């Protein structure tokens, strides 16, 4: 259809599309408000989209016709919100709905000025916060003063300190980089915080989710954090065992995906051993922990406190820095002894970096596929041994025994594949 034939030019079509987007985003918020309302609501399935459209139309009028429109439209919205608030003030229901209406108006303004992704993000975020009100309130009321302080420490580490650190190598062999080290601290802190929230919300049996989520970020950090928890809370032995083994499983899949992003040939080459090891992991988890996990899923006797320990995160960062220095030192002494040595050394800290580097090498030089495949598998074995050392040093004897099965499997499967 030619829109010009029916009198719709490109600018008009653009405005119409923006109005539709504003309507859709307003509907998302309005659906949630309508669902929550027991009686007629100030904003709901009809009013919220209208407010978002008002924001878009006000922006259009402001830009093309009358620069005083915002005083009229936004002022009217504020007035209606105040009237509604004072009308319901005796009910003590807060100002959530009034604030949501103002945000809906702002979303409409953002849509007009082409901040579409920001508008979608805000709409989804606001709707999520509104929908999770019972869960968030229950969680907030369960927090102690110590919990609040720990959360503030976590935000200090993640938001305040990191941007201030220089991204520059220094020290012997340029082995140290404060920003890189602090990234590790943030990873550990985030996983610790996620684990705490899950335990506080649903209990210790949800620790396995930490393994799945953490495996996408750093299976090493998961191994370290959950190992520590078994020392603090021995009843979390089986939950921590499952979390760590799942993180190791996710790491295997992540390596395949990373290699495939660069070279499908390398992904195919490492697919069999890593998937085979992962399948064996899952079978062991199902057989070994199914009944025990159900039996020990009770939180009875477990007093979870102090969710974020700054020193524990710093300790992990210090160990990371020491290992990084050791790698640079060995590389300086022995030089480049080939891909296998580089893979073993790099795998101690980061499987992702060596996987991407070797995949690029194989893509540029197809004849090196066999060497590159072995190199990646060596890095996986090396990384698994390093994670097991964390479990051994910071976890209980029982946890070490449980994780030893998974170390043996990944080493045996990848080792045999390398030899064959």
Image: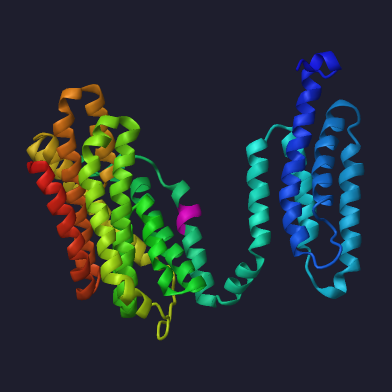
Residue 327 sits in quarter: top left
> How many marks are shown on the rendered structure?
0
Q: Main secondary structure of the magenta part?
A: helix
Give the left or right position of residue 190, taking residue 399 as reference: right
Q: How is the image coloured?
A: rainbow
Residue shown at the point (23%, 28%) measured from the top left: 361
Residue shown at the point (78%, 59%) measured from the top left: 34
> Relative to 275, is 312 above or below?
below
Give the left or right position of residue 215, taking residue 66 as reference: left
Q: Position of residue 27 (x, y in %)?
A: 75, 48
Residue shown at the point (40%, 60%) measured from the top left: 191
Residue shown at the point (20%, 60%) measured from the top left: 406
Q: Position of residue 118 (x, y in %)?
A: 64, 41
User: In the rendered structure, which segment of residues is drawn in magenta?
Assistant: 157-161
Q: Foreground: 261 or 78?
A: 261
Q: Position of residue 368 (x, y in %)?
A: 16, 27
Give the left or right position of residue 400, taking residue 248 as reference: left
Q: Looking at the rendering, in which quadrant would you find the N terminus?
A: top right
Confirm whether residue 185 shows in the render.
no
> Relative to 25, is 266 above or below?
above
Q: Looking at the rendering, in which quadrant would you find the C terminus?
A: top left
Give the left or right position of residue 360, taking residue 342 as reference: right
Q: Foreground: 171 or 189?
A: 189
Confirm whether residue 60 shows in the render.
yes
**Residue 363 colored in magenta in the image:** no
């Amino acid at each position: 259809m030619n829109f010009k034939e029916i009198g719709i030019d490109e600018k008009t079509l653009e405005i119409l599309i923006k109005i539709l987007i504003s309507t859709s985003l307003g509907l998302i918020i309005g659906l949630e408000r309508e669902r929550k309302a027991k009686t007629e609501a100030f904003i709901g399935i009809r009013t919220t989209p209208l407010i978002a459209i008002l924001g878009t139309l006000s922006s259009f009028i402001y830009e093309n016709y009358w620069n005083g429109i915002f005083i009229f439209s936004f002022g009217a919205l504020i007035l209606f919100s105040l009237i509604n608030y004072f009308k319901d003030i005796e009910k003590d229901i807060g100002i959530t709905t009034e604030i949501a209406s103002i945000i809906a108006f702002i979303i409409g303004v953002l849509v007009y000025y082409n901040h579409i992704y920001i508008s979608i993000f805000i709409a989804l975020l606001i709707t999520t916060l509104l929908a999770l009100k019972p869960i968030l309130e229950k969680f907030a009321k369960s927090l102690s003063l110590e919990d609040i302080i720990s959360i503030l420490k976590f935000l200090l580490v993640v938001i305040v300190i990191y941007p201030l650190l220089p991204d520059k190598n220094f020290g012997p062999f340029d082995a140290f980089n404060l920003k890189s080290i602090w990234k590790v601290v943030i990873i550990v802190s985030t996983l610790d915080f996620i684990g705490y929230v899950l335990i506080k919300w649903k209990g210790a049996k949800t620790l396995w989710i930490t393994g799945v989520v953490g495996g996408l970020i750093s299976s090493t950090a998961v191994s370290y954090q959950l190992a520590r928890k078994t020392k603090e809370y021995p009843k979390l032995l089986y939950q921590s065992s499952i979390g760590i083994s799942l993180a190791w499983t996710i790491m295997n899949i992540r390596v395949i995906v990373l290699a495939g992003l660069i070279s499908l040939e390398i992904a195919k080459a490492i697919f069999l051993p890593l998937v085979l090891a992962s399948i064996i992991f899952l079978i062991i988890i199902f057989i070994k922990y199914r009944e025990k996990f159900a039996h020990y899923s009770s939180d009875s006797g477990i007093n979870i406190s102090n969710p974020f320990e700054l020193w524990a995160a710093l300790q992990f960062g210090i160990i990371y820095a020491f290992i990084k220095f050791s790698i640079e030192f060995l590389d300086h002494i022995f030089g480049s002894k080939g891909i296998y040595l580089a893979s073993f050394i790099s795998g101690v800290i980061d499987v992702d970096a060596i996987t991407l580097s070797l995949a690029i090498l194989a893509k540029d030089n197809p004849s090196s596929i066999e060497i590159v495949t072995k190199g990646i598998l060596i890095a996986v074995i090396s990384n698994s041994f390093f994670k097991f050392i964390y479990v051994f040093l910071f976890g209980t004897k029982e946890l070490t025994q449980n994780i030893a099965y998974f170390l043996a499997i990944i080493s045996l499967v990848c080792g045999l594949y390398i030899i064959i």
